[in-house]
Amino acid sequence: MDGVILIGQQETREGNGFFQATDPSSGTLIEARFPEATADHVAAACALANVAFDEYAMLAPEKTAQFLETIAEEILAIGDDLIVNAMQESGLPRARLEGERGRTVGQLRLFAALVRKGEWLDARLDPALPDRQPMPRVELRSRKIAVGPVAVFGASNFPLAFSVAGGDTVAALAAGCPVVFKGHPAHPATGELVAKAIGRAVAKCGLPAGVFSYLPGTTHKLGGALAADPNIKAVGFTGSRAGGLALMRIAASRAEPIPVYAEMSAVNPVLLLPAKLAADAEALGKAFIASLTMGAGQFCTNPGLLLAIDGPDTDRFTASAAEALAGNAALTMLTPGIHAAYCKGVDALSAHASVRLVARGLVGEGPHQAQAALFETDAASFLADEALGAEIFGSTSLLVRCRDAEELKRILSKLEGQLTATLHMSAADEQLAAALMPLLVRKVGRILANGWPTGVEVSHAMVHGGPFPATSDGRSTSVGTMAIERFLRPVCFQDIADALLPEALKSANPLSLPLRVDGALK
Ligand code: NAP
């Protein structure tokens, strides 16, 4: 059965031909065919989203919350078909995908709870002061509203939690923005199952059809047309640096430029501080390899860079890591393209005159499997070649041996923006950690101690963001409830009669929202 393009509630197979996904574990094409959406579909979906906007943006929070919960139920109702398709299209194991489904559903429910509470509307009232001298004050009321229809591009590495009903989609829908989703070409069957689940939730909740559309396709042209469509008011993206940059350029050169929230590349430095390394080098080596190789290293938070002060404790660490790596089985990567890019990156490190191989994992037995690797270099060489700081998406990391803490700081200060930085430290390292903290705060979205950056909690205080190029805009997060902020803007109502005000701002407070009066929360 061929797949479909979803323009609101309308399904069509009439695209610009068909495409098929590849099963990365066999390297063969999967039988099902999916239509390539065209520029006309982009225009139709975006126009429909624009029609839906006014009603959807002003929906009572309770109704939006129910919609998000209904999406969660509809995703669960797909059953095992979702997991089976995602396994075939991504090469990821069942347990990982079942966990990801749980995360996707949990994320929808978390946002539903957030929407219900209403704090995100940030309702404010500065009452009129007619007798104020020397000038009376007008009455001012404000709230946040949705920015408009949002284009979302999902990532290949989380076919559920960062895809069709993933973080960006949920944050946009929670804010009141209709979503037009560009399907990822690597997992079209998985994407369509989830898109149809969202479509059923739209119908069940009696929402306007344009609240959600789904455009499968394999061309940059399709995604470019979506980012350029005048009805789109913001873009959410997770993927490659090249893709994120291309969409940023398109968005900035529109007649009406729009924000792009792109989560792109990071090497997530892990700092092994001296006292901790002296105490725990062997255990750290093993734990590091477990984090590096999980899911073939296909995480935006993968620890791609290690910094340590050179000496015998660092040698103990590398010996232990090498031992753990030697028995590490190669895992299938998500797509042939990602595998090819990984091999190219590893080959470049292998061939680099200043880089030494510490150890490699086992050679893969099937197609598209990542053979993990750990390399090392010295700080001077690292500082001399920017290319050594680039992300290799997969289970490869580079250890930089620094002469002293000053050299370690110099490296940190030269690094690009990062999603995370990790400190492995004990009490005796506290002084050094304190000295590093201002640099880390400048550079990253999340600083963690004595853990590993892989594993991102979906919660209220989580920040999965960071300065460029970790993201295109370090002022926000793509994971956790703060992500709703990306798709909101404030609107102020000055001396507007109660009858004309949105429900959220009417004097009687019919939605029982928290209200900030003269700056103080009531
Ligand atoms: P990707 O190639 O950037 O693709 C992500 C989405 O954006 C796809 O729907 C893709 O569709 C679209 N796209 C890419 N370039 C575009 C362009 N120039 N114009 C318009 N649309 C564009 O990412 P991916 O497929 O997930 O993985 C490829 C590489 O991305 C990996 O090797 C890795 O380096 C990086 N990656 C990073 C993260 C992260 O979290 N930071 C996650 C996953 C992957 P089309 O190809 O159909 O245009």
Image (cartoon, rainbow, N blue to C red):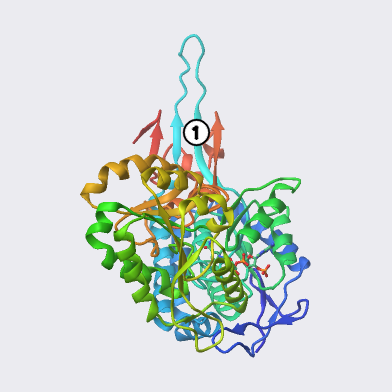
Could one spot residue 238 in this view of the protein? yes
Horizontal side, residue 158 vs residue 321: left or right: right
Q: In this view, does 151 lie above or below 283?
A: above
State the image quarter where residue 238 is shown. bottom right
Q: Nearer the viewer, residue 276 or 116?
A: 276
State the image quarter where residue 33 is shown. bottom right
Mark 1 element type: strand
The residue under label 1 is: 141
Where is residue 320 shown, x and y percent of the image?
31, 70
Q: Nearer the viewer, residue 369 or 350?
A: 350
Where is residue 128 shown, x and y percent of the image?
47, 23
Where is residue 47 shown, x and y percent of the image?
71, 59
**Mark 1 residue type:** Arg
Where is residue 96 shown, x and y percent of the image?
41, 77
Q: Is residue 254 above or below residue 194?
A: above
State the image quarter where residue 434 is shown. top left
Residue at 37% from the left image edge and 70% from the top image edge: 289
Could one spot residue 511 in this view of the protein? no
Horizontal side, residue 43 vs residue 372: left or right: right
| Number of disc labels | 1
Q: In this view, does 442 lie above or below 469?
A: above
Residue at 56% from the left image edge and 50% from the top image edge: 384
Q: In which quarter of the image is ligand 1?
A: bottom right
The reply to whether the residue tagged 1 has its Cβ within 8 angstroms of ligand 1 is no
Work out which quarter of the rendered image holds the N terminus and state it.
bottom right
Horizontal side, residue 476 vs residue 424: left or right: right
Estimate how packed mark 1 is, as few (under 14), some (14 to 19) or many (20 or more) residues with alpha carbons within 10 Å: many
Work out which quarter of the rendered image holds the C terminus and state it.
top left
Residue at 31% from the left image edge and 45% from the top image edge: 433
